[in-house]
Amino acid sequence: MRHRAGSIGIVLLLACLPASCGDEKSATPTPIEEDTIERCSNGTDDDDDGLVDCLDPQCEVFCGDSDTDSDTGSSTHTGEKEDPCDPIAGTGCDAPDECKVYWSEFDPPEPEVNCGPEGASVQGDVCERSGDCEGRLTCWQSCRPPCHLTSDCSGGGAGIYDASGCVVVRDGWGYCTLPCDPFAPDSCPVGTSCMLIIDGDLPTTDCVADLGAGVAGDDCSLPLQCAPGTACDNAVGGFTCEALCDADDDCGGGTCRLLVGGLIGTCR
């Protein structure tokens, strides 16, 4: 019996040799190159080399200059590096790549400028990453042009519905707003709604993907917190969501406080 048990053990051992365990070996995930800003900021060792995100030399182009502490393995980013290309002028990349602004998953997001393949989504389409967008468009909820200044954004008309502004996020980089008509729900691409942004008495509009549910009278601190058809305005006593209007008749006995330009306002 002892000899037979040993034979069985040998058989089991042979059954688990690599040559006969192809199914288990093939089940091992194939390493993925860390060659995008998303893979260099997801906290995962995608290429199985023991180095995560900006500690991996492959991520240097996305992470900028960094000093790695050999004792702790931590990395300190200086963030001071020259962008390899210009996404506004469209220079610095070899075809078919385009110069794009990528946003990290950090909070707040960090911009990284680099050459990369373009996607198929056009301006205004809802997106998940800048690589989804065509040309030099960047992804901020939806595909839109990157910018430093409002002058980088097209559509600088006199009316609020065709004037685009630059919202700077970090390190001088931002995104252009997508002008729209707050009174016309179909003025934005599918999946987005028109938001009125009030800066003092100056109005700007933008198509965004996730407007809040705040109704007239609800407290607010950001334009995104108010539902379509309302805007976050500094009413008496603080910032609240207020119904949009262009005349007193829209306010059910209240007063329409028109903003600069006289095209739109909020009820009081």
Image: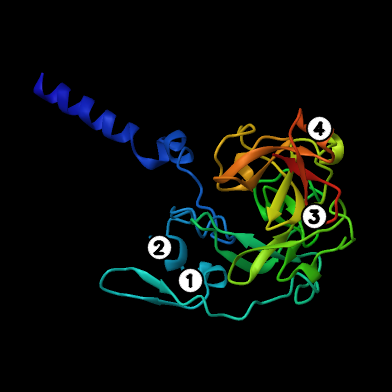
User: Type of residue at label 4?
Assistant: Asp
Residue 51, which numbered label? 2
Q: Residue at x 86, y 63 (%)?
A: 156
Q: Residues within 10 Å of mark 4 (few under 14, many from 20)?
A: some
Residue 134, which numbered label? 3
Q: Residue at x 60, y 65 (%)?
A: 111
The answer to whether mark 2 and mark 4 are in CB contact below 8 A is no
The residue labelled by disc 4 is 250
Q: Is residue 181 shown left or right of residue 49?
A: right
Residue 57, which numbered label? 1
Q: Residue at x 82, y 46 (%)?
A: 264
The answer for how far apart the CA atoms under marks 1 and 2 are is: 8 Å
Q: Earlier in the sequence, mark 1 or mark 2?
A: 2
Rendered view: 118 above or below 268: below
Q: Earlier in the sequence, mark 3 or mark 1?
A: 1
User: Type of residue at label 2?
Assistant: Leu
Element on which disc 2 rests: loop
Q: Residues within 10 Å of mark 1 (few under 14, many from 20)?
A: few
The answer for how far apart the CA atoms under marks 2 and 4 are is: 60 Å
Quadrant in the picture for residue 203: bottom right
Depth-wise, is mark 2 or mark 4 nearer the camera?
4
Depth-wise, is mark 4 or mark 1 nearer the camera?
4
Q: Residues within 10 Å of mark 3 (few under 14, many from 20)?
A: some
The answer to whether mark 1 and mark 2 are in CB contact below 8 A is yes
The answer to whether mark 4 and mark 3 are in CB contact below 8 A is no
User: Type of residue at label 3?
Assistant: Glu
Depth-wise, is mark 4 or mark 3 nearer the camera?
4
Q: Locate the C terminus and report the quarter of the image it occupies.
A: top right
Which residue occupies the foreground of this view, 21 or 112? 112
Which residue occupies the foreground of this view, 81 or 228? 228
The answer for how far apart the CA atoms under marks 3 and 1 are is: 28 Å
